[in-house]
């Protein structure tokens, strides 16, 4: 089993549980979109299952007019600050307590994930900047690719995290 | 030993020990269990399903109907495994099945004597009376007498996993056509997955003496395998059986990763389930040589000619010393040469066709007598020792032989492709069925497409790969070509049986004879599907690969039709036997489905909680102490102590939704029966939602935190449904509203703090905020920071006591609850579980899941007055239907037993005193019940016709399921503090 905060390190595969990551959901107000919302934070939020990186925050497209913002900055103020910035154009709810994040990186990362994810992660289809809201072992996950190593971050609901760890250990040990 | 000194693909430097029926044997790396048994002269390997006839190895692949064995011991026992598909491993233990006391001497072989009784459908006709005898006597006896191996009945010690794959081209089968297709597509840069049942790719090329591009066919296959393995765009899945095709070009397969019947190395799954999405696919599953139907064709020593070729060529194992070959195809002649080349004497070659054959002189030169236009009549011996043939002139000749190689026509293996509406059609030139149309994206190639010779299969594999690549927009101009040595491939099957004197089998696995097929036809089972059900022809692990064609041809003959007119069956997945464990994967035991644990889970465990499953959630049910006799003691204590002092309960499982937007209030007005747009900021209100049909959907509280922000809660059970309902309303019904909604169930850990000391506890915990009745009256809410994290306090009560709900980010939920227990110690705080929570809500007459059961209206639950008449809301119109406003509808009441020692139980139905217990007199039912520690007796909530007007009346609670009828008094559903003084205190 993976212990909290302690990752596996193996040739071609590193797994790490990231701690204290802030999350906030962003829903576009009426007649607003990724572009108009993005104006307030110095960019444009990409629509669709894609990520947009603005400053130290990653905005993950999770549905039409819907994003999950995440950052390693101080979790306690993240959502409030974002809500203030986006006031009038988007509704923001703190979700920092809702998610745990696992980072998987290395040559075998894709192979490992493909044991749980039923969507195509081949680099022709899913690469840096791509995101997906899907399931692994019946557990809802949000996955986004950080770099071409490849590195993936996987957010799961906190209450499911012991079960997600179980899937990870089960799938990892047969390498 | 019957092993050739050299040749074959076995590694003689790597001997492997194994046992069969307790005897030690030795084989080599590269052997299958079947080839190793043959090399060790083991001919008798099984007893048949119904007649317990001695059986040997018939084939060399997945089509094997006879040689089913049980591998391994104890929990690793794996029954009904085809010896022909098991790669030999060191230490393998196998035992035969369906025999007693031994394989050589099986008492139940006596069944053969009674075989006139055991014809198709015999037990439908024989064991009819008395009817009750069937379950008690007949069926157990039949089940004991028939059957195959048995399960270990122990938990499966193996693990299984799954993987998802995506490709441009999936090639199913790695024989000549499959290798050619995969090479063509892979060299053109397509992403290719090649899956094959066998441990090596090559299919029949591994067992043939044929040259391709100047190399022996087996060497050529190994070379091409190496080439494919080195290509980054190719995945080779050996020991992998594709077993199903589904919509959306989805294929399922399982891959054998460790040996059946033995422990795997740490962490290695036994099998992996693959879900493959292939833009295009090629069915290159080859063809199966069909047996010939004659008397004694099932005897050990009678084998498929192609299997004999495989055993002598690929495994260097000799299945006999003196052989007769009977054929109706060219491949039978080729097999005769293979057998002769391996050093086995072929004493006769019998061709049912009367035409001269080009290989006749060579076969004859090596000592075989050639009989054209002849047929085998009977085969004799427990293991074969004599064959009787009927010559073209009608005379009979008897031949001493220990091996009879039979070569019928070939049948394309199209089972996998005969799915999703694709129907096989009869092809006269092939004398078999083939795929006319196919599932989307799939084409058949090679032998599966009727191209039986290696040369034709290679060419067809290339052509189909080019065709499929074209479909994907890739044009291949430099497709490979392959030079092969000559190979003949014509056949003319003779279906009819000769005048056999002994049983002639059509389906070896199910003991179906030619007579059974004739009987079925005679009794009116003239459709192939009916034939299958009546006789079991084509069922079980081999899925009729060696029996269907013969069976359908015999049915055609018996009904005076052509085989094409009779047709063949369609297939459904799985086309190969799949272990249930493979389908379940890691989802077994505790992990059958995911579980959700609240932030206080570990603390609750430390406090001695027993947990109950509520949907996926694990909730603390009660916290029993060592000195408490049973759970009821613990619950009673939790109720008393909460009502007298203070208790804390984790209620994080309630659904929580943030609703934002300028029109959030309007949206909520339309969702709930009562109004929220006028709710003041900082206040909370109880609300009820209806379904469109007017019944209650859910209830909960709504708190307004800002002009454009509400926070609503739902019941635990309905969290997802309500979220879906709200999204439907805002996205589909009223997209013009500026209203957004998002689930924050996971964000907040919420704890109910209830009891007269709850305010004191919270005030001590958060000294900087004012929680007095003035600042924080009933149904108020506030937000502040604690250790930097936002805390939300709601003055809400489910227990009926002075109570609060405290929420904090789930990141620090465990920290907050630990802190509250520390601070609460001075106030006598205790944890309470869902059971005590339930008792207290029943005491207060609060409705919950049992009452919100989808059949009740707001009025039924006493909440009718909440229904606003000033606004529209979902369910308003339908709630006014006559049936839903009928005054006789069951309404919420309280019930208490007349004899206070009686226990009321949920589910009991309510009857007037003295009325007979019949549906016509049914007046309602008990929804919730509990022992009230506060009142000292059992109490219940129920739905009773005209309930509101019947306070003080007596009813009988009738509970035939759980026993005991209890006389009860109808009362106000609020048993405790009906004025609500305590919660406002």
Image: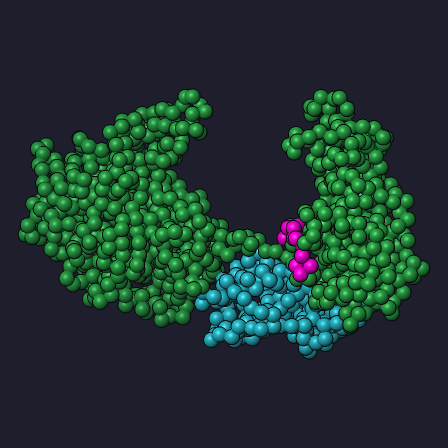
Chain colours: A cyan, B green
Residue B120 image offset from top left, x and y in percent:
33, 30
State left or right for residue B453 relative to residue A142.
Answer: left
Residue B124 image offset from top left, x and y in percent:
38, 26
Magenta span contains residue B924? no
Q: Residue furthest front?
A: B627
Residue B792 image offset from top left, x and y in percent:
81, 63
Q: Nearer the viewer, residue B446 or B120?
A: B120
Give the vertical position of B651 relative to A94 (above or below): above
Residue B234 location, quadrant = bottom left
Magenta span contains residue B609? yes
Residue B955 location, quadrant = top right
User: Looking at the image, which residue is at 34% across and 27% down?
Assistant: B122
Asked whether residue A88 is in view, the answer is: no
Q: Nearer the viewer, residue A122 or B145?
A: B145
Numbered range of the magenta stretch: B604-616
User: Looking at the image, which residue is at 7% across and 52% down?
Assistant: B366
Q: Nearer the viewer, residue A147 or B187?
A: A147
User: Looking at the image, which residue is at 26% across and 59% down?
Assistant: B17
Give the vertical position of A51 relative to A117 (above or below): below
Q: Residue furthest right?
A: B774
State left or right for residue B181 relative to residue B645.
Answer: left
Asked whether residue A171 is in view, the answer is: yes
């Amino acid at each position: 089993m993976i212990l909290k905060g302690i990752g596996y390190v193996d040739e071609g595969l590193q797994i790490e549980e990231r701690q204290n990551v802030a999350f906030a959901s962003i829903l576009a107000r009426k007649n607003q979109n990724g572009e108009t919302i993005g104006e307030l934070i110095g960019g444009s939020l990409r629509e669709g299952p894609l990520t947009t990186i603005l400053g130290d925050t990653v905005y993950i497209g999770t549905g039409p007019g819907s994003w999950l913002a995440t950052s390693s900055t101080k979790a306690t103020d993240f959502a409030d600050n974002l809500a203030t910035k986006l006031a009038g154009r988007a509704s923001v709810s703190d979700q920092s307590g809702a998610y745990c994040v696992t980072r998987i990186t290395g040559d075998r990362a894709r192979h490992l994930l493909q044991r749980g994810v039923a969507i195509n992660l081949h680099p022709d289809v899913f690469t840096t900047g791509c995101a997906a809201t899907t399931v692994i072992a019946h557990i809802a996950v949000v996955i986004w690719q950080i770099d071409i190593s490849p590195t993936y971050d996987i957010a799961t609901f906190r209450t499911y995290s012991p079960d997600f760890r179980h899937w990870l250990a089960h799938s990892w040990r047969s390498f | 030993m019957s092993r050739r000194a050299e040749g074959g693909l076995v590694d003689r430097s790597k001997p492997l020990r194994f046992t069969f029926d307790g005897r030690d044997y030795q084989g080599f790396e590269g052997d299958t269990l079947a080839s190793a048994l043959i090399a060790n002269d083991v001919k008798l390997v099984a007893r048949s399903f119904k007649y317990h006839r001695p059986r040997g190895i018939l084939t060399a692949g997945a089509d094997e109907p006879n040689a089913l064995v049980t591998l391994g011991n104890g929990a690793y026992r794996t029954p009904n495994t085809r010896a022909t598909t098991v790669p030999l491993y060191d230490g393998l233990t196998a035992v035969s099945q369906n025999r007693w006391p031994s394989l050589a001497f099986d008492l139940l072989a006596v069944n053969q004597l009674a075989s006139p009784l055991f014809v198709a459908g015999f037990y439908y006709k024989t064991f009819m009376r008395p009817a009750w005898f069937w379950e008690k006597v007949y069926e157990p006896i039949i089940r004991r007498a028939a059957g195959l191996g048995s399960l270990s009945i122990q938990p499966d010690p193996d693990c299984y996993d799954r993987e998802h794959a995506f490709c441009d081209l999936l090639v199913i089968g790695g024989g000549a056509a499959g290798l050619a297709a995969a090479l063509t597509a892979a060299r053109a840069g397509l992403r290719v997955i090649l899956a094959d049942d066998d441990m090596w790719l090559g299919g029949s090329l591994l067992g043939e003496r044929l040259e391709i591009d100047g190399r022996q066919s087996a060497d050529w296959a190994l070379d091409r395998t190496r080439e494919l393995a080195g290509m980054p765009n190719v995945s080779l899945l050996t020991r992998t059986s594709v077993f199903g095709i589904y919509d959306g070009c989805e294929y399922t397969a399982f891959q054998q990763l460790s040996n059946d019947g033995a422990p795997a190395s740490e962490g290695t799954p036994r099998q992996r389930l693959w879900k493959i999405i292939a833009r295009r696919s090629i069915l290159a599953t080859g063809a199966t040589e069909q047996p010939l139907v004659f008397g004694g064709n099932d005897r050990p020593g009678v084998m498929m000619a192609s299997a004999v070729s495989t055993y002598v060529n690929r495994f260097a194992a000799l299945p006999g010393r003196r052989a007769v070959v009977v054929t109706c195809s060219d491949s039978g002649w080729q097999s005769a040469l293979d057998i002769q080349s391996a050093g086995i004497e072929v004493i006769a070659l019998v061709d049912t066709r009367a035409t001269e054959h080009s290989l006749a002189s060579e076969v004859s030169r090596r000592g075989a007598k050639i009989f054209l236009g002849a047929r085998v009549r009977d085969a004799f011996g427990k293991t074969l020792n004599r064959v009787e043939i009927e010559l073209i002139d009608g005379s009979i000749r008897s031949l001493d032989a220990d091996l009879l190689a039979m070569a019928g026509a070939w049948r394309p293996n199209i089972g996998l492709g005969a799915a999703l509406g694709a129907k096989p059609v009869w092809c006269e030139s092939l004398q078999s069925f083939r795929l006319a149309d196919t599932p989307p994206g799939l084409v058949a190639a090679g032998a599966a497409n009727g191209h039986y010779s290696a040369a034709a299969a290679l060419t067809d594999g290339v052509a189909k790969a080019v065709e499929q690549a074209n479909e994907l927009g890739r044009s291949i101009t430099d497709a490979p070509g392959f030079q092969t040595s000559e190979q003949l491939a014509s056949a003319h099957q003779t279906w009819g049986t000769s005048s056999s004197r002994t049983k002639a089998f059509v389906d070896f696995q199910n003991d179906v004879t030619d007579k059974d097929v004739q009987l079925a036809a005679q009794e009116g089972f003239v459709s192939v599907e009916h034939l299958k059900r009546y006789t079991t022809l084509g069922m079980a692990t081999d899925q009729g690969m060696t029996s269907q064609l013969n069976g359908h041809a015999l049915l055609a003959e018996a009904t005076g039709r052509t085989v094409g007119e009779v047709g063949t069956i369609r297939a459904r997945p799985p086309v190969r036997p799949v272990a249930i464990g493979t389908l379940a994967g890691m989802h077994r035991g505790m992990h059958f489905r995911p579980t959700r644990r609240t932030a206080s889970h570990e603390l609750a465990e430390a406090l001695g909680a027993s947990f109950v499953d509520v949907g996926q959630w694990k909730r603390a049910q009660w916290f029993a102490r060592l000195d408490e006799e049973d759970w009821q003691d613990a619950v009673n204590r939790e109720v008393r102590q909460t009502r007298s002092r203070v208790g804390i309960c984790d209620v994080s499982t309630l659904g929580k939704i943030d609703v934002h937007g300028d029109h959030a209030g309007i949206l909520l007005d339309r969702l709930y029966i009562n109004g929220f747009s006028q709710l003041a900021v900082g206040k909370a209100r109880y609300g009820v939602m209806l379904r469109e049909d007017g019944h209650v959907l859910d209830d909960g509280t709504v708190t307004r935190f800002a002009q454009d922000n509400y926070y609503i809660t739902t019941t635990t059970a309905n969290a997802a449904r309500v979220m879906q309902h709200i999204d439907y309303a805002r996205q589909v019904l009223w997209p013009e509203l500026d209203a957004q909604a998002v689930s924050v169930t996971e964000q907040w850990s919420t704890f109910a703090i209830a009891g007269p000391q709850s305010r004191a506890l919270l005030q001590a915990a958060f000294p900087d905020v004012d929680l007095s009745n003035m600042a924080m009256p009933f149904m108020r809410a506030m937000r502040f920071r604690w250790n930097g994290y936002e805390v939300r306090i709601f003055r809400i009560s489910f227990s009926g006591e002075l109570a609060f709900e405290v929420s904090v980010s789930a990141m620090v939920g465990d920290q907050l609850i630990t802190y509250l227990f520390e601070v609460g110690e001075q106030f006598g705080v205790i944890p309470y579980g869902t059971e005590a929570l339930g008792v207290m809500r029943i005491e207060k007459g609060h409705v919950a899941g049992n009452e919100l059961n989808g059949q009740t209206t707001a009025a039924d639950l006493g909440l009718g007055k909440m229904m606003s008449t000033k606004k529209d809301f979902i369910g308003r119109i339908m709630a006014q239907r006559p049936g839903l406003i009928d005054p006789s509808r069951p309404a919420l009441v309280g019930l208490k037993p007349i004899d206070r020692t009686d226990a009321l139980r949920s589910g009991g139905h309510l009857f007037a005193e003295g009325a007979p217990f019949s549906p016509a007199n049914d007046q309602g039912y008990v929804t919730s019940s509990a022992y009230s520690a506060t009142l000292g007796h059992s109490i219940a909530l129920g739905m009773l016709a005209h309930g509101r007007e019947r306070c003080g009346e007596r009813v009988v609670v009738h509970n035939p399921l759980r026993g005991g009828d209890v006389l009860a008094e109808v009362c106000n559903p609020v048993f405790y503090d009906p004025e609500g003084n305590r919660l406002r205190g």
